[in-house]
Amino acid sequence: MRIVRRVSRSEGSAGRPTEQRTTTFTGTVYADSLLDGTDGAAATSVFFAPGGRTFWHSHERGQVLHVLEGAGLVATEGDAPQPIGPGDIVWAAPGEVHWHGGGPESMVIHLAVSLGRTSWLGPVSDADYGGSQ
Ligand code: MN
C-alpha cells in the first residue's frame, strides 16, 4: 500500500501548465499529478479552460473520470460529444479512443484515474469538438 499525503505533493507538481504540451492537449489545460504511475495506475487532477481538451487517445487498461466542478464534454470515436458535470463518472474502456475537455464556454475539473499506458493520437478538430461529424 502506498499513501500519498496531500501535503507531500503540494510542492512541485501542482498547477503545472500544459499549454506548451502540443502533443497531448489543445488550449489551456493544467494537470496536477496526484499519483504517478504506481503499478500502472496514475491519478491526475485536470483543469480545462473553455475550449481546452485532450488529443484523441486511449488507455491501455481503461480510465475512470470523476467530474468535480464545471461543465465539460467527453466523446468516444464515432459518437457526438456528451456533456459532463459535477458528480458524473465516465469509464473509458481499455483501448477506447476518446477525448475529454471543457465546454465551449465553460471550464471543467475532473479527477482522472488512468490504468496502463496512454496512447496519444492527433488533435481533436474544431468540427469534432463542436459535435459535427
Ligand atoms: Mn482519457
Image (cartoon, rainbow, N blue to C red):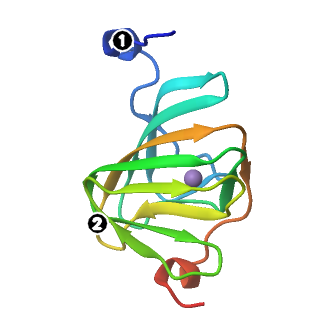
- Amino acid identity at mark 2: Ser
Locate residue 39, reporting x and y percent: 66, 22
Locate residue 64, reporting x and y percent: 49, 47
Question: Image point 64% across, 81% down: which residue?
Answer: 78
What is the distance, in whole Å, between disc 2 and disc 1 at their CAs? 30 Å
- Amino acid identity at mark 1: Arg
Left or right: where 89 falls relative to 21: left
Q: Quadrant of the C terminus?
A: bottom right
Asked whether mark 1 and ligand 1 are closer than 8 Å, the reply comes as no
| Quarter of the image where one finds residue 105 | bottom left
Locate residue 58, reporting x and y percent: 68, 55
Question: Image point 56% across, 47% down: which residue?
Answer: 63
Asked whether mark 2 and ligand 1 are closer than 8 Å, the reply comes as no
Question: Image point 45% across, 57% down: which residue?
Answer: 90
In the rendered view, tell whether residue 13 sits above or below residue 94: above
**Label of residue 106 in the image:** 2
In the rendered view, tell whether residue 130 sits above or below residue 76: below
Mark 1 neighbour density, 10 Å: few (under 14) some (14–19) many (20 or more): few
- Residue that sits furthest to the bottom in the current view: 132
Front residue of 114/52: it is 114
Q: Secondary structure at mark 2?
A: loop
In this rendering, the label closer to the viewer, 2 or 1: 1
The residue where tag 1 is placed is: 5
**Label of residue 52 in the image:** none
In the rendered view, tell whether residue 114 sits above or below residue 54: above
In the rendered view, tell whether residue 105 sits above or below residue 17: below
Mark 2 vs 1, N-terminal side: 1
Q: Is residue 19 visible?
A: no
Mark 2 neighbour density, 10 Å: few (under 14) some (14–19) many (20 or more): some
Locate residue 77, reporting x and y percent: 65, 74
